[in-house]
Amino acid sequence: MNVATDSTWKTSQQPPLTAFEGQLTNLCAQDKYREMAESYLSFVKSHAGTSYLAFEPIPAKVSDHLIKKTQSPSAFITMTLRRPTWETELSKALADPAAFQTFVKSLEADVLAIAKQAKKLS
């Protein structure tokens, strides 16, 4: 008899988009940005018409992750003010997993630099 664990059962019972969002959260938490883009491309290819819904949580997942990682919400907000098109750039980078990884890492570097500068001033 094959008995599924609670977590396996919960994942298998979720709608595809919900399971996909959970996968994005896990990948982002592990800094697997390339895999996030690959997962996105695979999902929208196999679920026609979902590109907007599949993209919608990605900027929030990236921002949440960068804020947690840098421990500086104000640095993240400052970065968004300096780069007001970051979400559009993020969307464009999703078409190429390597470009997406490079772009997210550049956002992370920007936020870290801003946070370090703020600490020097205080």
Image: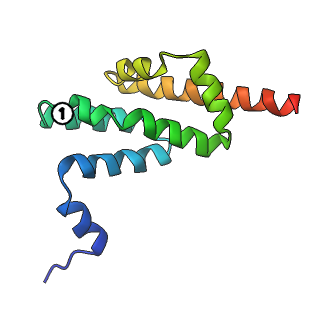
- Foreground of the two, 63 or 37: 63
Residue shown at the point (46%, 28%) measured from the top left: 101
- Looking at the rendered structure, the secondary structure element under dot 1 is loop
Q: Is residue 110 visible?
A: yes
Residue shown at the point (79%, 30%) measured from the top left: 118
Task: Quarter of the image for the N terminus: give it.
Answer: bottom left
- Foreground of the two, 103 or 84: 84
User: x and y percent of residue 17 in the render?
Assistant: 22, 46
Number of numbered callouts drawn = 1
Task: Tell me: 54 left or right of 70.
Answer: left
Residue at the spot of label 1? 50
Q: Is residue 93 above or below residue 122?
A: above
User: x and y percent of residue 23 in the render?
Assistant: 33, 49
Residue shown at the point (49%, 23%) measured from the top left: 103
User: x and y percent of residue 57 in the render?
Assistant: 36, 38
User: x and y percent of residue 20 in the render?
Assistant: 27, 46
Residue shown at the point (51%, 36%) measured from the top left: 63
Residue type at the position of mark 1? Thr
